[in-house]
């Protein structure tokens, strides 16, 4: 199974996934795609010896350049790991139930457009929630609404900062995302 990772940011999740599948017989990370040429994920891909490509945001609107590249790489599964643009419908229809996303909250709470990074943790704090967590889900046409594959939670309290919550949530992301991808491939792809 050939995996493409789409990421817009630092890429710590992408790095965990690249490391996890480095010697795997089941799957390989074939490429990393970003919409930001300064994204930290590009250095992480470089260090991992994995090909990366940057596309301008227009390419994600027309979809064609991305689709061409995904086909050229013979990609079977697309992983969004901190990808902040909307995935065009053409890509979703080309990869039905083959695009996974990770969201740093317990969907359906705190999802939707614009709910990413500290915005999510600020909202959780404002509501004085006692727990938050991660959701790994299939991607469909609407932000953060695809079938949920996995959730994990952690305790928080209103005295914590958004940064502290983000750090606790990232531990869950790094701990679970690669394994959830592997199980999904074993059950649904290969
Ligand atoms: C993570 O919080 C993830 O839940 C969200 O974007 C962030 C990506 O972080 N989708 P990183 O770039 O993998 O460090």
Image (tube, rainbow, N blue to C red):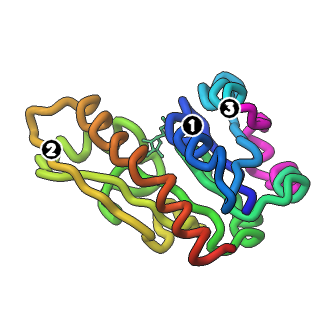
Residue 136 shown in magenta: no
Q: Secondary structure at mark 3?
A: helix
Residue sitting at 62 percent across and 49 percent down? 21
Residue sitting at 77 percent across and 34 percent down? 54
Could you give the CA–CA distance between mark 1 and mark 3, rounded to whole angstroms? 8 Å
Residue on which the image places disc 3: 48
> From the viewer's perspective, is 158 left or right of 142?
left
Q: Are marks 1 and 3 in contact (CB under 8 Å)?
A: yes
Mark 1 vs ligand 1: CB below 8 Å = yes
Q: Is residue 149 above or below residue 155?
A: below
Residue on which the image places disc 2: 156
* Residue range highlighted in magenta: 49-68
Q: Secondary structure at mark 1?
A: helix
Could you give the CA–CA distance between mark 2 and mark 1, rounded to whole angstroms? 26 Å
Few, some or many C-alpha atoms within 10 Å of disc 2 (few <14, some 14-19, many ≥20)? many
Could you give the CA–CA distance between mark 2 and mark 3, rounded to whole angstroms? 34 Å
Residue closer to the observer: 148 or 188: 188
Residue 177, position in %: x, y? 47, 53
């Amino acid at each position: 199974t050939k995996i493409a990772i789409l990421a817009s940011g630092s890429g710590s999740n992408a790095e965990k996934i690249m490391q996890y599948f480095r010697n795997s017989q089941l799957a390989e990370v074939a490429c990393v795609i970003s919409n930001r040429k300064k994204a930290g994920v590009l250095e992480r891909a470089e260090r991992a010896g994995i090909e990366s490509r940057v596309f301008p945001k227009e390419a994600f609107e027309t979809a064609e350049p991305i689709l061409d590249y995904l086909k050229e790489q013979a990609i079977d599964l697309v992983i969004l790991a901190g990808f902040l643009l909307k995935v065009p419908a053409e890509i979703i229809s080309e990869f039905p139930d083959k695009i996974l996303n990770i969201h740093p909250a317990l969907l359906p709470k705190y999802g939707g457009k614009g709910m990413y990074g500290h915005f999510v943790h600020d909202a959780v704090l404002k509501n004085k929630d006692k727990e938050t967590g991660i959701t790994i889900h299939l991607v469909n046409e609407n932000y953060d609404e695809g079938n949920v594959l996995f959730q994990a939670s952690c305790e928080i309290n209103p005295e914590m900062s958004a940064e502290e919550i983000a750090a606790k949530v990232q531990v869950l992301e790094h701990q679970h995302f690669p394994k959830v991808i592997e199980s999904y491939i074993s059950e649904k792809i290969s």
